[in-house]
Image (spheres, rainbow, N blue to C red):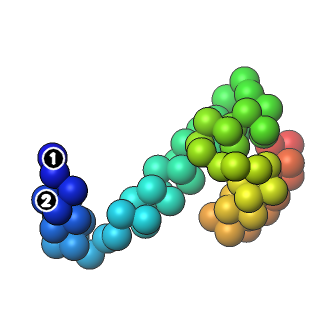
């Protein structure tokens, strides 16, 4: 699928590409944390965050608590 086609389809569903990426990252972050197989640093890397602190801020924004508290 071409870039313009993707953006047109997302626009018709009133969703931006960034919102879609955020939704996928959130879903995967929660799943990875629940699996308790990987460290938080590894999860952050898998989801494309450059630093653990950026992942922590994003997770706090998504679920309202820190990754460590959510993991426990």
Side of 65 relative to 1 (left or right):
right
Residue at 73% x, 33% y: name it: 42
Residue at 16% x, 67% y: name it: 8
Q: Residues within 10 Å of mark 2 (few under 14, many from 20)?
A: few
For this orientation, the residue located farthest to the top is: 37
Residue at 34% x, 70% y: name it: 16
Pick the front one: 4 or 56:
4
**SS for tag 2?**
helix
Residues under labels 2 and 1: Cα distance? 6 Å
Residue 44 in view in this figure: yes
Residue at 86% x, 52% y: name it: 69
Q: Residues within 10 Å of mark 1 (few under 14, many from 20)?
A: few
Report x, y in % for residue 29: 62, 45
Side of 58 relative to 67 (left or right):
left
Disc 2 to disc 1: CB gap under 8 Å:
yes
Side of 4 relative to 21 (left or right):
left
In the displayed structure, 67 sits above or below 19; it is: above
Report the quarter where the C terminus lies.
Answer: top right
**SS for tag 1?**
loop
Report x, y in % for residue 26: 56, 53
Residue 70 in view in this figure: no
Report x, y in % for residue 31: 59, 38
Report x, y in % for residue 17: 36, 63
Tell me, for residue 19, which label it has, or none: none
In the displayed structure, 63 sits above or below 41; it is: below
Residue marked by disc 2: 5
* Label tally: 2
Residue 6 occupies which quadrant of the picture? bottom left
Residue marked by disc 1: 1
């Amino acid at each position: 699928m071409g870039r313009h086609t993707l953006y047109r389809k997302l626009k018709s569903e009133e969703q931006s590409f960034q919102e879609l990426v955020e939704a996928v990252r959130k879903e995967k972050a929660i799943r990875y944390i629940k699996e308790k197989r990987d460290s938080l640093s590894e999860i952050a890397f898998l989801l494309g965050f450059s630093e653990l602190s950026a992942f922590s801020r994003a997770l706090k924004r998504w679920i309202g608590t820190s990754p460590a508290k959510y993991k426990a």
